[in-house]
Image (cartoon, helix red, strand yellow):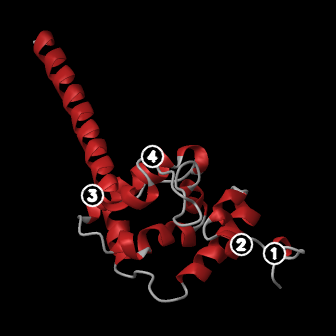
Amino acid sequence: MKKMAALLGLFLAVSANAESAGSLASAKANYLLGCGGCHGIQGASNGRMVPDLRGQVGYFLNSPLGRAYLIQLPNVAFDPISDRDLAAMMNFVVFGLGGGSAPAQAKPFDAAEVGELRRHPLTGDGLSDHRAKLVEDLIARYGASPALRLYRGDRYEPASANAGPDKEE
């Protein structure tokens, strides 16, 4: 009886690890299909054209607005995968590709949260300005990396960085 219980416990542990590994593989595959072409296989891209994710996307989890922003981005919100799969993919993005940039107390996304947030996608011309404000708040209040400003170059640098002989005023 003890051997049977031990075998059952071992089977359950192996099954849980296999399911977890399968879920991670699925999340990576969804990332590569939906995001990797622009953001890069490892989350490193041409940061002036497309935001780098590697080592910095987790900073957005410091703020409720930043957390929502990640799911409400049009290419994320409109992704045809399920809420559960999107949550797994975004957890791979922020905790995997984001490395140590996610705050220690950050909770993973779940299907219910993702489902609610993606019903309210960010659209329109104000998306760039919205991101710029979020980035400045994350840098000022949470010590996020100033590298978050790189996307689209000077557009996201604070006003004082824009002044100077080489910059238009």
Between residues 159 and 145, which one lies in front from this camera angle? 159
Q: What residue is at 57 percent from the left and 60 percent from the top?
A: 47
The spot of residue 76 in percent (x, y) is: 37, 69
* Residue at 20% in and 20% down: 10
- Tag 1, which secondary structure? helix
**Identity of the amino acid at label 1?**
Asn
- Give the labeled residue for mark 3: 85
Q: Which residue is mark 4?
A: 42
For the N terminus, give its image quadrant.
Answer: top left
104 displayed left or right of 97: right
> In terms of sequence position, does the residue under pointer 4 or pointer 1 come before the other?
4
Counting other residues with Cα less than 10 Å from the Cα at mark 4, is it few (<14), some (14-19), or many (20 or more)? some
Q: Secondary structure at mark 3?
A: helix
Q: Nearer the viewer, residue 160 or 57?
A: 160
Q: Residue at x 46, y 45 (%)?
A: 96
Relative to 107, 5 lies left or right: left
Q: Amino acid at mark 4?
A: Gln
Q: Mark 2 belongs to which amino acid?
A: Asp
Gap in angstroms between the C-alphas marked 4 and 1? 31 Å
Q: Which residue is mark 2?
A: 154
Residue underneath mark 1:
162
Report the side of 160 relative to 94 (left or right): right
The residue mark sitting in front, 1 or 3, is 1
In the image, residue 142 sits, relative to residue 22, either above or below, namely below
State the separation of the CA atoms marked 2 and 4: 25 Å
